Each structure stands twice: as C-alpha cells, then as structure tokens.
C-alpha cells in the first residue's frame, strides 16, 4: 500500500459518503482479497434490487451472473 493507493481509496469512499478512516482501511484491505466485484445478481440478492449497482473496486472486473 502506498499513499496514492490510500488517496484513491479515500476519494472513492468520500464520493459515496463513506469518509471515516475505518471504512477506508476496511475497503482497502478487503480489496486485496477480491478478484472481482459482485455480479449484478449477487448485488440484487445481497444488497437490494432497489439500489443501483455500484462497482466497489473500479480496477476489478464485474463477476459474471
């Protein structure tokens, strides 16, 4: 992790109203374990069909449904 990665993470979370440092660190650590973003089906099942899909990790692909 370098400062540019952390700044990217902070900016991404701040744009979505999540600016607390713990949220930033959690997102960054979790990103290191992920190979893909949720699929659109996973989003509908686990988050909500009423909330528009958000690609949590911009540099990762979206998993196929």
Image: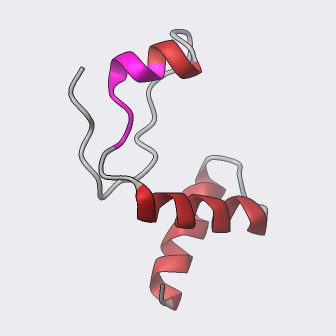
Number of marks in picture: 0
Residue at image location 58% in from the left, 58% down from the top: 27
Residue 52: where, in percent of width, then height?
48, 22
Left or right side of 58 for 19: right
Residue 21: where, in percent of width, then height?
76, 69
The one nearer the camera, 47 or 8, is: 47
Residue 24: where, in percent of width, then height?
65, 64
Q: In which quarter of the image is residue 10?
A: bottom right
Residue at image location 43% in from the left, 65% down from the top: 32
Q: What stretch is highlighted in magenta?
A: 37-43
Q: Give the answer, above or below, for where 23 lies relative to 8.
A: above
Q: Quadrant of residue 53?
A: top left
Q: Give the answer, above or below, for where 4 lies relative to 44.
A: below
Q: Residue pushed farthest top? A: 49
- Coloration of the structure image: secondary structure
Left or right side of 10 for 62: left
Q: Does the magenta stretch include residue 15?
A: no
Residue at image location 65% in from the left, 58% down from the top: 14
Q: Quadrant of the C terminus?
A: top left
Q: Give the answer, above or below, for where 45 lies relative to 55.
A: above
Q: Residue pushed farthest front? A: 33
Q: Give the answer, above or below, for where 15 lies relative to 25.
A: above
């Amino acid at each position: 992790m370098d400062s540019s990665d952390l700044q990217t993470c902070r900016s991404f979370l701040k744009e979505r109203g999540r600016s607390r440092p713990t949220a930033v660190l959690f997102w960054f650590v979790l990103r290191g374990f992920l190979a893909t973003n949720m699929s659109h089906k996973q989003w509908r099942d686990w988050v909500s069909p009423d909330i528009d899909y958000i690609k949590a990790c911009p540099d990762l692909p979206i998993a196929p449904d």
